Amino acid sequence: MSLDLAELIPNILLKSSINPINLRVMEFFLQMTTKFLTGFERDTIQQAYDCMQCSEPITNPICHDCLGNQISSWLGFYPNIKKKIMPKIKDYVKEVNNNTIESVNCACCSKQKAALCPYCFTEGIFNLLKKSKIDRMVVMDFLSTFNFDLKHEGYIQDAIENGLY
């Protein structure tokens, strides 16, 4: 059974005191309930929202370019370290770019490139900082500024065990 909203809406308005905003909300939900996704559509949408590294759903869609720019800005507080580590971070971002397929839109730049979740990206940067033997206080500052390990079960646990957090 198909409902024609163009016929239904005037009748609702005439017979009730529903304001236009509530009517738009009703119209939206009516349209949503009449659209069912096929299994293929659902799987395709799900894959586009999963992290390419950990396969978990991307719930905080910030792309690697935007996070890399934010980390670069933060490193402005540490100019000597920035000179040392930024080439490695740029290489890491380039590597992620080369492996990125279309994904969910970034919340910052709106480009369709948030294929790596912020947790995996910042874990990669954390590992770069550790390998580069960056000062302990700088690593601690990084972790407090860019902590996407909200459950403290991943790289933050590693940092706690090594006295870095």
Image (tube, helix red, strand yellow):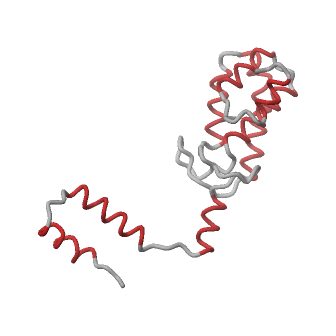
Where is residue 144 shown, x and y percent of the image?
A: 67, 23
Kindly identify the residue that appears in the image at 52 percent across and 47 percent down. Answer: 110
From this view, report whether residue 121 is shown above or below residue 130: below
Count the numbered circles shown.
0
* Closer-to-camera residue (135/29): 29
Q: Quadrant of the C terminus?
A: top right
Question: In terms of image quadrants, where is residue 43?
Answer: bottom right
Check the image and name the residue furthest to the bottom: 1
Q: Residue furthest left?
A: 14
Horizontally, residue 50 falls left or right of residue 95, namely left
Q: Position of residue 148 (x, y in %)?
A: 67, 35
Rendered residue at 77%/39% (across/down): 92
Q: Position of residue 49 (x, y in %)?
A: 63, 56
Q: In the picture shown, does residue 7 fall above or below 151?
A: below
Residue 19 versus residue 79 in the image, above or below: below
Frontmost residue, 100 versus 160: 160
Q: Residue at x 57, y 75 (%)?
A: 38
Q: Is residue 34 left or right of residue 112?
A: left
94 lies above or below 34: above
The foreground one among 90 and 54 is: 54
Quadrant of the snapshot with the N terminus: bottom left
x and y, in percent, of residue 90 in the image: 74, 36
Residue at image x 78%, y 38%? 91
Q: Quadrant of residue 147?
A: top right
